[in-house]
Amino acid sequence: MSPKQHRGEVTSDLLLDAALRVFVTSGEQGLTVNAVVRESGVSLGSLYHHFGSLDGLIGALSHRWLDRLLGELTRALQGADGARAGVAGAVRAYLAFVQEHPGPALLLHSPLADRKGMARGREFRDAQEARVSEVARWIQLGIDAGELAPLPAPLIESLLMGPVVAVARRSLSGIDDVDLDEAARLLPDRIWRSVGA
């Protein structure tokens, strides 16, 4: 990597990290170009050069953390001995991510992310194609082995992740009635009842 490329990567990281901090402390309304530039110490021109717009910056930030979350889920699924253990591993990995990275988790579960995901869902999914394909492949292998219910893969994915995402959202919303460690213990068996063969 050339020194210029390295500087560009450092500048991008400064902007992405600053955008996350601004989002966590000020919410969606406070996430402005000026706030990010002020927080990062990077010039306005650099923000536009690297990301094109605030929307581009938010998209890159979401992709960065979604890729990390999907990577952890994929490792949990693939490292498990059997589909049932994979379900338990995925639940634990997702909820551990929420606990370990509350700021990024808040962004990924925010109304802002929902709106962007609905408006550009195909684009987001295509950008994560390698990770999504690995999950789909794990599901298909489970179905073929007779461990997972013979349902379309998107339904298995929804039955697996839907309750976990709902618990994560509830926890991140500030409602203090969800214990994520308890959920990580209880949800795998309940989810398995809906996806197991």
Image (cartoon, rainbow, N blue to C red):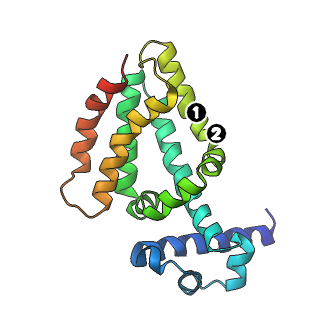
Residue drawn at 20 percent across, 60 percent down: 176
Residue drawn at 37 percent across, 56 percent down: 100
Q: Residue placed farthest to the front in the image?
A: 119
* Label 1 sits on residue: 134
The circle on residue 94 is none
Q: Position of residue 143 (x, y in %)?
A: 48, 17
Q: Position of residue 104 (x, y in %)?
A: 45, 61
Q: Amino acid at mark 2?
A: Ala
Q: Is residue 119 left or right of residue 44?
A: left
Q: Position of residue 57 (x, y in %)?
A: 62, 69
Q: Quadrant of the N terminus?
A: bottom right
Q: Position of residue 187 (x, y in %)?
A: 27, 36
Q: Amino acid at mark 1?
A: Glu
Residue drawn at 37 percent across, 16 percent down: 197
The answer to whether residue 79 of the structure is visible from this angle is no
Are the residues flagged by discs 1 and 2 in contact, CB closer than 8 Å? Answer: yes
Q: Is residue 163 left or right of residue 76?
A: left
